[in-house]
Image (cartoon, rainbow, N blue to C red):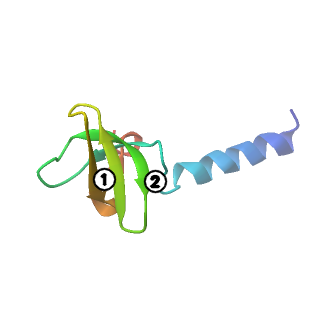
Amino acid sequence: IRPSEIEAIREFLHEAENHPLVTGDEVEIICGAMKNVSGVIRKINNRYTVLYLEQLGATVCVNVENVARLDRIK
């Protein structure tokens, strides 16, 4: 692998680290009645995300501002 390719991969990973939420991300609800419940993003629109909560076997709609990716919390 050439040094330029390695650098391109590093840049991509850095940008991906700061990328907003995407479908399939595991997130945790950070406030409200379901605080600290984690789930997987099924769908995202401008203001809300649809999460599947395996613990409850339920799908819920949560404001995007009220969730955080698990890898960013820890």
Q: Where is residue 60 in the image (x, y as percent from the top left)?
A: 26, 49
Residue drawn 36% across the image and 56% down it = 49
Quarter of the image for the C terminus: give it. top left
Farthest left residue?
33
| 69 versus 20 height, above or below | above
Q: What x and y, as percent, mark residue 15?
A: 60, 54
Left-right relation of 4 to 21:
right
**Horizontal and vertical percent for residue 2?**
88, 37
Closest to the observer, 2 or 66: 66
Spot the residue most to the right. Answer: 2
How crowded pointer 2 is (Cα within 10 Å; few <14, some 14-19, many 20+) is rated as some
**In front here: 72 or 59?**
59
Taking the spot 69% from the left edge, 44% from the top edge, the residue there is 10
Identify residue type, mark 2: Leu
Please give the count of numbered marks on the rendered protein: 2
Residue at image x 53%, y 48%? Answer: 17
In this image, 56 relative to 71: left or right? Answer: left
Q: In this view, does 66 lie to the left or right of 31?
A: right
Q: Residue 21 carries which label?
A: 2
Location of residue 31 by image quarter: bottom left
The extreme bottom residue here reads: 46
Query: Which element is circle 1 on?
Result: strand
CB within 8 Å, label 1 to label 2:
yes
Which residue occupies 47% across, 42% down?
A: 24
Residue 72 % position (x, y): 39, 45
- Choose the circle earlier in sequence order: 1 or 2: 2
| 72 or 30: nearer the viewer | 30
* Quadrant of the rendering where the N terminus is positioned: top right
Q: How far apart are the two marked residues, 1 and 2, measured between alpha carbons?
A: 9 Å
**Label 1, on which residue?**
67
- Name, please, the residue furthest toward the front: 58
Q: Pointer 1: residues within 10 angstroms few (<14), some, or many (20+)? A: many
